[in-house]
């Protein structure tokens, strides 16, 4: 049995859940309140972060290395190109979302609006929320520009880059922080990825005290 210790709205956990589902791997989801620093959880990952994956008798941490482990272990369907240039571009885009987008957008919107309340870390910082709301426009425009030239974010095939982006955007969509009317290319791209069977478990997520908007699970928005 594969076991994933996760937090429902964590984009890093969501990225991994999408990969596991796309590769049709059965997994037991264990919700982890990582901020409580449970001793058993810290034994699994001393960094105190999710996701943590138990697979093949191993305990794996950090979302991108785990995703690449799964890609090597279960190569079908492929989520990384075979070419060196193609693999570079996928890794560049994954890094863009998990680093730049995360720092400028996800941390300022999702973490301020939701995580602070869940973890008892205080009240949302309105300045950070305004900064995140401003930054997401730039990122959506950049995605739209990429999709003008490509079928998917990193090329002509769906890859881990698309799952990384969709993980962040789906977390933000849960709290209605994505303007899907800003760019038609992005809206169409998200509609394609949102309709995949791998996305179903994400659309069924429910976080106590934070009900999703009506459009969240609607495949036609």
Image: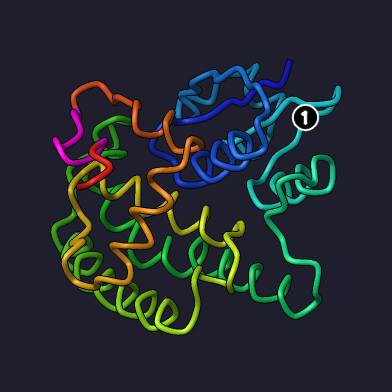
The image position of residue 136, as x and y in percent, is 28, 69
In this picture, which residue range is highlighted in magenta?
210-217
Give the residue displayed 44% in from the left and 80% down from the top.
146
Asked whether, in this view, residue 25 is left or right of residue 103, the answer is right
Asked whether, in this view, residue 204 is left or right of residue 44, the answer is left
Asked whether, in this view, residue 189 is left or right of residue 62, the answer is left
The image position of residue 172, as x and y in percent, is 29, 50
The image position of residue 153, as x and y in percent, is 50, 70
In which quadrant will I find the N terminus?
top right
Determine which residue is flagged by label 1.
59
Q: For the residue carrying disc 1, how many other residues have a C-alpha within 10 Å: few (<14), some (14-19), or many (20+)?
A: some
Give the residue displayed 42% in from the left and 31% down from the top.
200
60 or 68, nearer to the observer = 68
Q: Does the magenta-highlighted stretch encompass residue 214?
A: yes
The image position of residue 178, as x and y in percent, is 22, 58
- Report which quarter residue 44 is drawn in: top right
* Number of marks drawn: 1
Question: In the picture shown, does residue 134 fall above or below 12?
Answer: below
Question: In the picture shown, does residue 209 fall above or below 1?
Answer: below
Asked whether, in this view, residue 98 is left or right of residue 177, the answer is right
Dot 1: what SS? Answer: strand
136 or 151, nearer to the observer = 151
Q: Does the magenta-highlighted stretch encompass residue 69?
A: no
Give the residue displayed 28% in from the left and 42% down from the top.
219
- Report which quarter residue 47 is drawn in: top right
Give the residue displayed 24% in from the left and 73% down from the top.
183
């Amino acid at each position: 049995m594969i076991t994933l210790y996760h937090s429902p709205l964590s984009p890093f956990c969501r990225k991994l859940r999408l990969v596991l589902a796309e590769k049709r791997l059965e997994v037991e989801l264990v919700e982890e309140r990582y901020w409580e620093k449970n001793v058993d959880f810290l034994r699994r990952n001393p960094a105190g972060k999710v996701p943590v994956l138990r697979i093949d008798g191993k305990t794996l941490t950090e979302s991108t290395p785990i995703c690449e482990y799964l890609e090597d272990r279960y190569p079908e369907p492929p989520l990384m190109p075979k070419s060196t240039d193609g693999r570079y571009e996928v890794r560049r885009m994954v890094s863009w979302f998990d680093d730049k987008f995360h720092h400028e957008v996800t941390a300022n919107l999702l973490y301020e609006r939701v995580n602070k309340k869940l973890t008892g870390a205080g009240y949302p910082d309105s300045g950070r929320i305004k900064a995140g709301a401003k930054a997401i426009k730039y990122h959506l425009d950049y995605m739209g520009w990429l999709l003008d030239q490509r079928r998917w974010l990193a090329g002509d095939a769906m890859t881990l880059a698309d799952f990384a982006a969709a993980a962040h955007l789906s977390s933000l969509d849960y709290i209605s922080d994505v303007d899907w009317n800003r760019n038609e290319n992005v809206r169409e791209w998200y509609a394609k990825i949102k309709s995949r069977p791998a996305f179903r478990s994400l659309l069924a997520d429910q976080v106590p005290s934070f009900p999703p908007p009506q459009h969240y699970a609607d495949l036609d928005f």
